[in-house]
Amino acid sequence: MENKDRISLIGIIGIGLTAVIGSGIWKDSLLWSNSAGIFSLLTLSIGWILMFTVGLAYAECVGMFPQGGGPYSYVGGAFGRKAGSFVGMLYVGGYYCIGALLSFLASLFSLAALSYGTFELLTTPNIFILTMVYIVLFTLFSSFTPGRKFGTISFVWVVIKILLVVGVFAFVLLKWSTATFDVPTFDGFQTAINTTIFALLGFEIMLVFAGETENAEKTVPKGILIALPIFLILYLFVSLAASGIVGIGDIAAGDQGSISLIILLASSAGVYGGWVFGFAAFSAAGVAYAILAMTTKQTKILAGDGVLPEVFARDQNFGPASVLTLVMALIVGGLMTGTMDIWAESVDVFATAGLGLILISAMLPAGLSALALRQKMPALVRPFKTPAYIIIFPLSILLSIYLIYLNFSVISLLLPSLFVVGAIALVAAILVFTRGNE
């Protein structure tokens, strides 16, 4: 690509930021405070430090392999083509689920904003229809956005999201009170750490666009190291605000759903709830847009390397790769939202399966690949070299294993989510090993 068409540092930062700062930021901090109170600031910092080890591992990997493909490229470089291809397929499958999930959340919050007070629009048929519409719109929008413009749009989108978050939580901070202070139990402290780590997932999608980034071997590592501290600062701010209005155990178990939490936030801030739901929908939409763009890009990369049929490698607006993203997201979104009345845990099952696939294919390979490359290719030029790697890379691996355990720890979701993961893994294995033998 010509340099003028490549993604800039600002663009790659925007891609990473918008993938993390979604609708969860409007409610998660209330749950963290409900578990750990003011100590949620400490739990968030601990979770961020652990997540930062993954960021450092990937910053080193992308410096050595500055092409697109993300985890797929680094696993392939460290453990061989078939291992990388299998991981790449799992990665795309996981984000089909998460892209559909974010479209669902954008639909949920849009309908809540439009019918705030009565919530009469929050019916399964309405959610199903709007989720399908959003998947189509986000896929089309991302397909017609070239690389550099995609980075610029992502950056502008996330700046607006940050301004909205800061604006609402600033009103919450005005009502801050020490009356909520309390010392959490060990379980509450641990729960807050666990949930804050999950809130920081997603920044790695910027790696998929390394092949379209200016001086990727330097720009992408720099983008990772800039984006991660921005996450920390923003989440510390919202956690501080939340800790002044929600004490430990203040939110009953039945009031911890997304709708109830955003109503609580709006009332605490003194902001009209319909607006806050609209802000949350806008935030979720930004993440869905970025994720669906990434899955299309990753599909083209996999096809270009022969993992998928060559037809999906065509570089055109709304080409075969975009159609595949659209079809897969619609299937997942349809199953997720169309069965809610008869399958109460449908959304949670696909969310668990999607996160599990991403943890297995993106989080776990970070430290493993970086460590293996250090051992196998010590002389390889490393534009970014992780300090104390012998500690940081194993920490990244241990964190990933722990998060995989946490993700599948809800017994009622275990079997159905593993079924989804197994089905995607089976399809990935068949594609990788049959095409690898052609």
Image (spheres, rainbow, N blue to C red):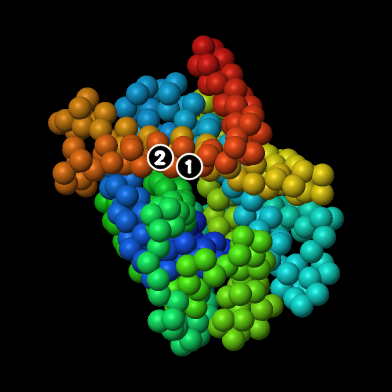
Is residue 417 placed above or below 210 in the rendered structure? above
Residue at 31% of width from left, 41% of height from top? 396
Q: Mark 2 points at which residue?
A: 402
Is residue 98 placed above or below 237 in the rendered structure? above
Q: Mark 1 points at which residue?
A: 406
| 346 vs 242, nearest the viewer | 242
Can residue 382 be seen here? no
**SS type, badge 1:** helix
Label 2: how many Cα within 10 Å (few below 14, some 14–19, many 20+):
some
Residue 236 coordinates in the image, percent (x, y): 38, 69
**216 relative position to 420: left or right:** left
Q: To which quarter of the image does residue 119 belong?
A: bottom right
**175 relative position to 323: left or right:** left
Contact between marks 1 and 2 (CB within 8 A): the answer is yes
| 273 vs 190, nearest the viewer | 190
| 35 vs 362, nearest the viewer | 35
Residue at 64% of width from left, 51% of height from top? 101
**SS type, badge 2:** helix
Residue at 75% of width from left, 52% of height from top? 132
Is residue 169 placed above or below 326 in the rendered structure? below
What's under tag 1, amino acid-wise? Leu
| 14 vs 352, nearest the viewer | 352
Residue 416 coordinates in the image, percent (x, y): 66, 34
Label 1: how many Cα within 10 Å (few below 14, some 14–19, many 20+):
some
Residue 80 coordinates in the image, percent (x, y): 37, 22
What's under tag 2, amino acid-wise? Tyr
Q: To which quarter of the image does residue 365 belong?
A: top left
Q: Quadrant of the C terminus?
A: top right
Report the number of numbered marks.
2
